[in-house]
Image (cartoon, grey):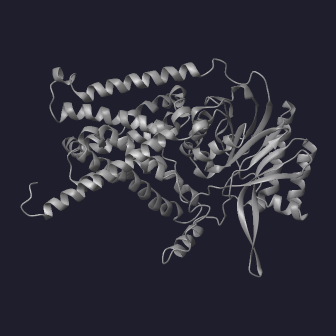
């Protein structure tokens, strides 16, 4: 017991790791829906610990905390290569430290700046946090999966804040609140401030003001959400099919069996007269649109299109797209991860090639880099990676005058892409995905949580069709109106009522708050560097006062 006490005394910052893990979506159990509250103070142990520490200790403690927290929360991503010997280990060894570097940089940079600008340290931490979150959302290898704001996805009154400030605005509020709490703890525990003197401290007053602000946001959220839930009238009835295809089985050997199951569930859904059928990302891994255009359909594709014609309903499903490029004397063909819309006559109408491919898993864009480029790509391919090429722009699909945008797989976590669809006139969003390889409820629910925010940010319905789940209708206020349990084959038919659609501040104006945060962070960093340069110059001038 004494050793445990000593460990907690010297390394209490590690408490942040399990608290972060509990904050994020794990299992779809009712009691865990109260756990988003933990996110508001999960960072307190680490924030308190780094105050006054040496630079090395700050980074090391933050990095170790990141390692533990990220492993607990995201080790399931290693299952992407679970069918390869050593694949899980390779992915985890690469991914978890990478995420932990970003996590540690947030704490390290914020603490360094705070020591130079002590009076505004409470605002520095959330500014740097949002800056790093933004960095993780841009570029070819973007991975904006770890937004702490998504921990609130079950608490819809708070989620409504994203309709104004986006997901990064929620991140900002959580971190500034956590840091303010940490300052209260620091003042009481480490500065030994007496209880009778605490009420006069700025840290107490600031935390009280934040609590009032949060209470106001929650109240506003409750008032914004309509009392009625679900469609009152049906502008579009949609059926989504969830077959739970085993991602590790051979597609070519089992494709007709899979198609038969898809047809069986789809036929059952037709009794409720849907106007659109949606299958998941990996439901039909064939070059459907390419072969249809060439008039060279294989037996599987012929049966698929014929079944759509007989059913008389349009179908949105996943496919392997092919794009061609002439290079000199050669015609090169590249695979893409597509969504394809097939009309009620069994004809391919339009395709959308996925823009945001999973880095390393679906492509590696830096093969040209000297020394490391080619070996890294070969390693990624050896452990389950694909060689897709990305699409260039979002594509709007149209169905009897109703426009919608399609997101393939983890594109639902990219808030800018979803807003762009709204700007292009989308009346709802469809996210087709296959999370079966995650082999965990955590992977499914973490992925789904982003759909709640995308719906609220843009004031649009989000229809999510997963191979193994979570298949659900999410209304423009983030409410699930119909769904299928995870890992349960079946179908769900739901009505989309566009009266709930609305413009939001975020959908109209985008990210002004985010850019204010980012510019402020860069200005702080610039001011910090200028101060360091001035101090260095003074030290180098003998006889000058310091």
Q: Residue furthest left?
A: 543
| Residue at x 84%, y 43% (from the top left corner) | 264
Give x and y (percent) for residue 302.
Answer: 90, 57
Give left or right: position of 476 versus 188: right
Give x and y (percent) for residue 504.
Answer: 60, 32
Give residue 360's quadrant in the image. Answer: bottom right
Q: Nearer the viewer, residue 22 or 297?
A: 297
Give x and y (percent) for residue 152.
Answer: 50, 33
Badge count: 0
Above or below, 288 relative to 114:
below
The answer to whether residue 135 of the structure is visible from this angle is yes
- Quadrant where the image shows the C terminus: bottom left
| Residue at x 65%, y 56% (from the top left corner) | 355
Above or below, 87 relative to 306:
below
- Quadrant where the image shows the N terminus: top left
Give left or right: position of 312 versus 363: right
| Residue at x 54%, y 29% (from the top left corner) | 160
Give x and y (percent) for residue 171.
Answer: 45, 39
Above or below, 6 relative to 140:
above
Give left or right: position of 60 versus 403: left
Q: Nearer the viewer, residue 510 or 21?
A: 510
Q: Residue furthest bottom?
A: 329
């Amino acid at each position: 017991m004494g050793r445990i006490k000593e460990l907690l005394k010297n390394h209490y910052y590690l408490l942040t790791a399990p608290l972060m893990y509990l904050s994020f979506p794990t299992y779809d159990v009712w009691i865990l829906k109260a756990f988003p509250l933990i996110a508001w103070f999960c960072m307190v142990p680490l924030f308190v610990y780094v105050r006054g520490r040496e630079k090395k200790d700050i980074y090391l403690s933050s990095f170790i905390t990141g390692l533990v927290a990220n492993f607990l929360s995201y080790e399931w991503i290693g299952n992407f290569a679970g069918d390869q010997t050593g694949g899980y280990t390779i992915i985890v060894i690469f991914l978890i430290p990478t995420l932990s570097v970003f996590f540690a940089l947030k704490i390290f940079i914020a603490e360094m700046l705070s020591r130079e600008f002590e009076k505004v340290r409470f605002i520095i931490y959330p500014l740097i946090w949002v800056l790093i979150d933004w960095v993780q959302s841009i570029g070819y290898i973007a991975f904006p999966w770890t937004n702490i704001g998504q921990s609130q996805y079950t608490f819809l009154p708070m989620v409504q804040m994203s309709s104004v400030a986006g997901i990064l605005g929620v991140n900002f509020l959580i971190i500034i609140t956590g840091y303010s709490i940490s300052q209260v703890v620091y003042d009481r525990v480490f500065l030994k401030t007496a209880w009778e003197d605490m009420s006069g401290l700025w840290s107490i007053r600031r935390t009280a003001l934040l609590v009032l602000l949060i209470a106001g946001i929650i109240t506003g959220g409750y008032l914004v959400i309509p009392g009625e839930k679900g469609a009152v009238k049906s502008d579009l009835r949609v059926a989504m099919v969830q077959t739970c295809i085993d991602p590790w089985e051979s597609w070519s050997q089992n494709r007709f069996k899979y198609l038969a199951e898809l047809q069986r569930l789809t036929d059952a859904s037709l009794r409720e007269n849907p106007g659109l059928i949606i299958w998941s990302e990996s439901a039909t891994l064939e070059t459907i649109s390419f072969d249809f255009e060439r008039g060279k359909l294989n037996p599987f594709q012929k049966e698929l299109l014929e079944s759509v014609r007989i059913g008389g309903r349009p179908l949105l499903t996943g496919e392997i797209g092919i794009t061609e490029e002439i290079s000199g004397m050669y015609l090169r063909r590249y695979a893409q991860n597509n969504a394809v819309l097939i009309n009620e006559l069994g004809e391919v109408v339009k395709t959308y090639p996925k823009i945001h491919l999973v880095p390393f898993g679906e492509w590696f864009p830096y093969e040209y880099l000297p020394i490391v480029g080619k070996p890294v790509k070969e390693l990624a391919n050896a452990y389950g990676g694909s060689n897709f090429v990305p699409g260039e722009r979002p594509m709007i699909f149209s169905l009897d005058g109703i426009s919608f945008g399609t997101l393939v797989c983890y594109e639902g976590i990219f808030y800018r892409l979803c807003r762009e669809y709204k700007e292009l006139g989308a009346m709802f969003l469809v996210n087709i995905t296959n999370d079966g390889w995650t082999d965990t409820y955590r992977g499914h629910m973490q992925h789904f949580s982003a759909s709640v925010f995308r719906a609220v940010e843009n004031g649009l319905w989000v229809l999510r069709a997963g191979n193994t789940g979570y298949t659900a209708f999410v209304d423009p206020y983030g409410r699930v109106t119909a769904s299928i349990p995870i890992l349960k084959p079946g179908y769900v038919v739901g009505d989309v009522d566009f009266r709930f659609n609305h413009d939001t501040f975020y959908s109209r104006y985008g990210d002004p708050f985010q850019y204010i945060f980012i510019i402020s962070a860069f200005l702080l960093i610039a001011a910090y560097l200028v101060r360091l340069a001035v101090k260095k110059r003074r030290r180098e001038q003998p006889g000058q006062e310091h």
